[in-house]
Amino acid sequence: MKKILLFSLLFIASFAFGQSLIVHIDAETLLFNKSFNKLYVAVNENDPSYPNSILELNPYTGEVLRSIALSSSLKEMKQSGDHSTLFFTYKNESKLDKLDIESFEIYTILEVGELSITDFHSSPIDKDIIFIITSDNGYPIHVKMYKNGVLQAKSFQPNTMMTEIGMKSDGSQLYLHNGGSTAFDGFLLDVVEDGIITDSIIWDEMIRSFGPIKNNNDLLYGSSGCVIDAFSDSIIMPVARLEVYRVADHNSIGGYTFSTIHNAYIFVHEVNDKGYLSFFHGDFYNYLGSIELATHNVYLRELEVIDENHFVLITRTAKADSRHILFFEAPDHIKYPLQLKVNEESYDDRWN
Amino acid sequence: MKIKILLITFMIMSLFAQAQECISVDHFSRDIEYNHHRDKLYALIESLDIEFGNRLIEIDVQTGIIVRSLFVGSNPYTLHLTTDGNYAWISFLSIPYLKRVNLNTFEIDKEIFLGFTRRYPNDGQRNPNIYSNNFNVFPNQNNMLVSGLKTVTSSSFESIFLYKNDSIQPIEITQGLNYSYPPTCFEPIINNQFIIGHIESNWESIFTSMKVLDDGLENFQAFDQLNTPDTRRNWIKVHHDTLIIADGTVIDARDASDLKTIGKCENQIINDRYGFAYSEFHDAYVYPNAYGSAVYLTFYDKHTYEAYDSVYILNYPHNIMMISQLEILGPDKFAIEIGKDYGLFSIKIIDTYANDIQDIGFDEKIDVYPNPVFDVLTIEGYPLSKEINIYDLSGQLLLSSNYGGFKVDINVESLKPGTYILKIRDRDSSTLIYNQKIILQ
């Protein structure tokens, strides 16, 4: 009888929490490339095995398949619209490089001298067109367009801090936003043959968003759960507010992504030092439920969806100083087994 | 003997179980309104609801079954049905729209975009997006409403506007809205010629009268002496040209330039339990009251404002409970939206047809203390029992007192030390609901 009970408890536990695999690589950022079906990881300088490297990993087992050393620590990594190329910037170097995934070779695309590259985005329709935000210790800020590494004539100088670039899927417009402060302002820019132009500044409290801007086709979204339509009209429209802040601990939202597989916006966050994936409907924006991550985490960031049940993120446990990669297999047969309690204090705090 | 006790206990339990019928609609509700034309309850569902989040749902009030649902937009906030019951107007927290749902087709048939002032090319001006946090539909009009436009983070308002003939009318109220407590709730009065605005604060008490013009609104008069201390979210309600406030205050608004407080329903709304209503079925004001975890609806005479009846509706286990909405479905049927403050709310449909007060264990709901007593005896509990009598052991009536609320203090200093009988009878003085010895020291 006791055996049956024990077995039942074990079964319930694995059913509710899923399974996880931790790979001890000190990762700065990661990307899943669906064309190659591989995970690409930028590794920090302190990692004992692969310092300052980009690794190609099996997205299910974490096995390192290929690696390439970088000249210094990587800052940010994105992939081209056709998934053939990785672009990345460095923490201490003023250049943008690319990695051709097929050949696994690195090329420098552009250098900006003494300036720093705050953010960049490749055109979704032409990977040789790159947009960058540069700054000189914060100001002045310039937004520039490069074609095949050549700076184009028309650039834009915003009069306030801008840290993030969002991009229309046809490559015709950019949306600039400040993802690093409490500001609400943004810019809409048109892409022309020889650069970028704008006629608008937007100050809009309903489109506020922290952190990197991400795309769900032509909808943009950020870590605060704000979904906006920046491109379908001449004005930017708030479309929805995903209320993840009402189920997550304050400031604990790490990675987030829109998953076409789930037709859901997925956020990784903490509640009482436990990690969760929380899902929000892709069309109706309501909460769908959460899955508890099968590990104890204090630091969660990045999130890549491999398939319906497999997720990869960067995490750090309470005792470890370095980050590592968590390969999480969600419980089968049931999508979102948990309904998290509402953080009642968040009610009045929804816009803060 | 044991069998007898068991049988009696079982009978009492059965009676209690039949005292009222409560259907729970376990979805996170943001606002509800009953449509008596269709005999359906309509509810806006919070985005955190897994099944019906961000939807308008139509509920069969007999069964609690959700008949139809419609995605209306992100974070729907306020619901108002038109008088004829054919349309539902909805405001939102996260998108700059008011939307109308045709309840015949159950489709959105009209959208009012509220972001019309948002963009200022080239000049660097900053221009907040705005949303309608509160609005109201004019009686007997399907396409005419008044709404405030509010920024997301500021308490100040952009404007208060009139919408009719499919457009926002050009003359808006924009002056005087930047003080701390601008009007946020709007009630059309006097044949739709005026609108009474009221703040959502429990600190200030400022009413604003606005005149309805052909092409907009104009400020008419502000009142700040009406002393209504608690008028948060659930604002004002209107019966003809009488305004009813959450704290029980009743205001005569027949002269929009001279609002007069004419009475007060002395309810004991605790912790912001502020769903209330005027009931056509009872021709009375109805307020929720609670004692411990037992929740009651109390009826107040519309002329004297005195409580004359009270029905038990349910037990609610949380300490900080709030009934945010009350809808009267029939003489014995009510719908409430209930939950914890700042938490999530759900809907309950309660049929009190069998809720005879004898069915309730009153002794458990009345506290009499101290006992023994020296000078003042305090009685606290089941509301509005009409008569409290103290007898000596020979049955002679010595003290009598009326009991109109939850708590009453009776001075017993005039009585000699000894043993007495305290009896409390219900509202008609016909049924004994409390019978206890008290000792006077």
Image: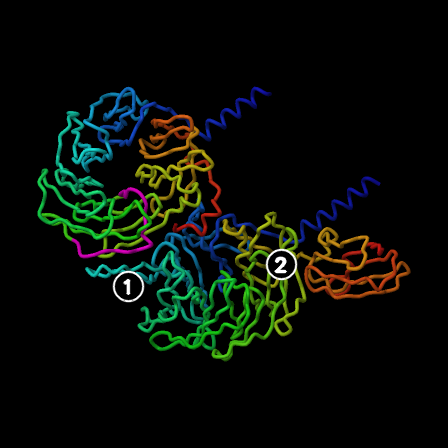
The label number, if any, that marks residue B279 in the structure image: none
The chain under label 2 reads B
How dense is the environment of label 1, judged by Cα within 10 Å: few (below 14), some, or many (20 and up)? few
Looking at this view, is A1 or A104 the one in front?
A: A104
Q: Which residue matches tag 1?
A: B117
Q: Look at the image and tell me whether residue B99 can be seen.
A: no
The local secondary structure at tag 1 comes to loop
Q: Position of residue B186 (x, y in %)?
A: 45, 68
Q: Nearer the viewer, mark 2 or mark 1?
A: 1
In the shown orientation, is residue A30 left or right of residue B278? left
Q: Look at the image and tell me whether residue B52 can be seen.
A: yes
Q: Which residue matches tag 2?
A: B289
Q: Position of residue A189 (x, y in %)?
A: 18, 51
Q: Position of residue A267 (x, y in %)?
A: 37, 39
Q: Note whether A32 is above or below A139 in the view shown.
A: above
User: How is the model colour-coded?
Assistant: rainbow
Both labels 2 and 1 in a single chain: yes
Q: Looking at numbered disc 1 in the image, what kind of residue is underneath it?
A: Thr
Q: Quadrant of residue A152?
A: top left
Q: Note whether B258 is above or below A209 in the view shown.
A: below
Residue at screen point 45% across, 64% down: B81
Q: Position of residue A175 (x, y in %)?
A: 22, 49
The segment highlighted magenta reads: A198-215
Q: Looking at numbered disc 2 in the image, what kind of residue is underneath it?
A: Asn
